Image (cartoon, grey):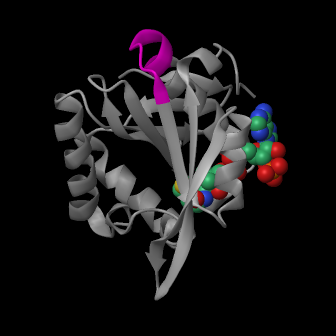
Amino acid sequence: MFEVPLRDNAHLIPLEVWHAQEFAEHMDRAREHIRPWVGPAFVTTGVDEARGTLSRYAERQAADGARIFGIRLDGTLVGGVMFTDFSAAFGNCEVGCWLEPSAEGHGLITRASTVLLDWAFTTRGLHRAEWHCRADNDRSSAVAKRLGMTLEGVRREAWPFRGVRYDKQVWAILAPEWKVGSGKP
Ligand SMILES: CC(C)(COP(=O)(O)OP(=O)(O)OC[C@H]1O[C@@H](n2cnc3c(N)ncnc32)[C@H](O)[C@@H]1OP(=O)(O)O)[C@@H](O)C(=O)NCCC(=O)NCCS
């Protein structure tokens, strides 16, 4: 029902349980592209598993926790951004993201993440936002950098994938470092 314009032909929408069919079809286009870089529970197959992901986010959002948002480009769901963690009590959150391959390279994630961070810092008064990624995920760390985040550290060999343990980067930005408009494409 509500959408935030990201660019002329791109919008950010709340991703809800009733989007399960659309989310499942999008996942068919995104699955192998995102698999190495996101948590295994997020890489779903079929409508039931898609509904499971969206239901988990809906339950957490009802408790003022995690939230998930989709990006529609020319009317098609092509990816999204989420608060993988959100705690008003602690003033902390973590932002995550994904895209299907055709939507990369347009600045959509930088713009969408800026909307989430503006809301977290400005509307909700949070103090700290994190961004976690595999250390060899260059496109993801480039977004964190573009958002003005600082690389705070590396959790060594914290990310197991197909028998190899990869390093995981932790990026963060604090409320006083966030200016409305920073990171905007
Ligand atoms: C991580 C991921 C979401 C990044 O996508 P992305 O398209 O590179 O990021 P953005 O949407 O912010 O776009 C930035 C790109 O658009 C380009 N761009 C074009 N117009 C732009 C604009 N107005 N503003 C900013 N960037 C713009 C940038 O130059 C950059 O492209 P480049 O790296 O080729 O120079 C994507 O690679 C992905 O889904 N990967 C697999 C899943 C994943 O890794 N998820 C994150 C887990 S931590």
Q: Nearer the viewer, residue 44 or 174?
A: 174
Kindly identify the residue that appears in the image at 70 percent across and 27 percent down.
Answer: 183
Kindly identify the residue that appears in the image at 59 percent across and 52 percent down.
Answer: 153
Indicate the position of residue 25 as horizontal and vertical percent values: 41, 60
Q: Classify residue 38 as left or right of residue 1.
A: right
The quadrant where residue 110 appears: top right
Kindly identify the residue that appears in the image at 21 percent across and 48 percent down.
Answer: 56
Q: Is residue 110 above or below residue 2?
A: below
In reply to whether residue 75 is colored magenta, the answer given is no
Q: Classify residue 90 as left or right of residue 173.
A: left
The quadrant of the rendering that contains the N terminus is top left
Q: Is residue 6 above or below residue 96?
A: above
Q: Classify residue 67 as left or right of residue 64.
A: right
The quadrant of the rendering that contains the C terminus is top right
Q: Which residues are magenta?
A: 119-128
The quadrant where residue 48 appears: bottom left
Indicate the position of residue 53 as horizontal and vertical percent values: 27, 54
Visible residue check, residue 8: yes
Q: Nearer the viewer, residue 154 or 69?
A: 154
Indicate the position of residue 31 as horizontal and vertical percent values: 47, 68
Visible residue check, residue 103: no
Kindly identify the residue that appears in the image at 34 percent across and 66 percent down.
Answer: 44
